[in-house]
């Protein structure tokens, strides 16, 4: 299962719309970097955030998720995540994953070195949508996350052959998601 290089990522993005909008080089001047890298794509976090709060003493339950668990924030420049707290966001980019590809994601070291962890589950073959990003502030201090700047890197792994059953085939519950998508059962 090879890791796909920048030439392959560029071709699939430009020809097939695998990543939209697509930035064909690494942008770094004065921002947390984003765009095409040697063996991956650094995606941006949008300005749409859902920051978890305990104002109404809500319980986080993945089977019965309540919107009382968070507050919505549309950031002009950044959002503040409280100490030892959590936020959901989404990528600026919309992804369309080929049938013979699995995508894994790692948080950017700039955030990790500040105690801000970015988590994303794998993007399965033929999944498409905005990627929901999970930011954990593991520090005892408020943490700043910058909107429209790099948040994580996607690495594309091509299978030896296409899978027998893709995410689209089984009508996955997060197919075609737009915006920050909450847990679904």
Image (cartoon, rainbow, N blue to C red):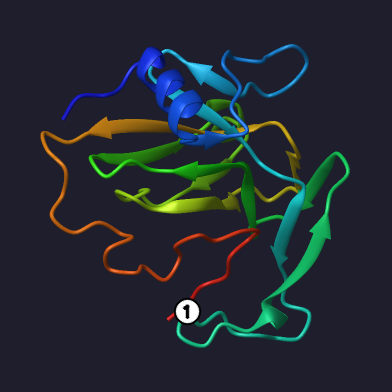
Residue 80, position in %: x, y?
79, 49
Judging depth in this view, the residue of 162 and 110 nearest the camera is 162
Picture mark count: 1
Residue 131, position in %: x, y?
53, 50
Judging depth in this view, the residue of 140 and 34 nearest the camera is 34
Judging depth in this view, the residue of 80 and 14 nearest the camera is 14
Q: Is 115 located above or below residue 30 in the figure?
A: below
What residue is shown at x 57% (from left), y 33% (from top)? 43
Query: Disc 1 marks which residue?
Result: 62
Residue 53, position in %: x, y?
73, 71
Q: Residue furthest front?
A: 15
Judging depth in this view, the residue of 52 and 88 nearest the camera is 88
Q: Is 61 located above or below residue 88 in the figure?
A: below
Q: Quadrant of the C terminus?
A: bottom left
Q: Is 149 located above or below residue 120 in the figure?
A: above
Q: Is residue 147 left or right of residue 121?
A: right
Say which element carries label 1.
loop
Q: Residue furthest right?
A: 76
Q: Is residue 174 left or right of residue 27?
A: left
Residue 87, position in %: x, y?
65, 58
What residue is shown at x 42% (from left), y 71% (from top)? 173
Q: Quadrant of the N terminus?
A: top left
What residue is shown at x 68% (from left), y 80% (from top)? 67
10 Å neighbourhood of mark 1: few (<14), some, or many (≥20)? few
Q: Is residue 57 left or right of residue 39?
A: right
Q: Is residue 32 left or right of residue 4?
A: right
Q: Is 134 located above or below residue 40 in the figure?
A: below
């Amino acid at each position: 299962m090879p890791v796909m290089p920048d030439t392959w990522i560029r071709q699939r993005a430009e020809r097939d719309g695998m990543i939209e909008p697509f930035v064909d080089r690494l942008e770094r001047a004065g921002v947390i970097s984003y765009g095409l890298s040697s063996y991956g794509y650094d995606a941006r976090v949008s300005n749409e955030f859902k920051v978890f709060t305990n104002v109404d003493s809500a319980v986080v339950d993945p089977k019965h998720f309540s919107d009382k668990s968070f507050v919505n924030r549309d950031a002009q420049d950044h959002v503040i995540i409280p100490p030892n707290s959590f936020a959901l966001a989404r990528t600026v980019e919309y992804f369309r994953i080929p049938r013979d590809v699995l995508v894994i994601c790692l948080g950017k070291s700039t955030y990790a070195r500040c105690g801000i962890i970015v988590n994303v589950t794998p993007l399965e073959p033929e999944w498409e949508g905005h990627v929901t990003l999970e930011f954990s502030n593991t520090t005892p201090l408020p943490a700043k996350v910058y909107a429209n700047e790099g948040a994580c890197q996607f690495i594309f792994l091509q299978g030896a052959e296409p899978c027998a059953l893709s995410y689209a085939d089984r009508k996955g519950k997060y197919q075609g998601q737009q915006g920050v998508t909450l847990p679904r059962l």
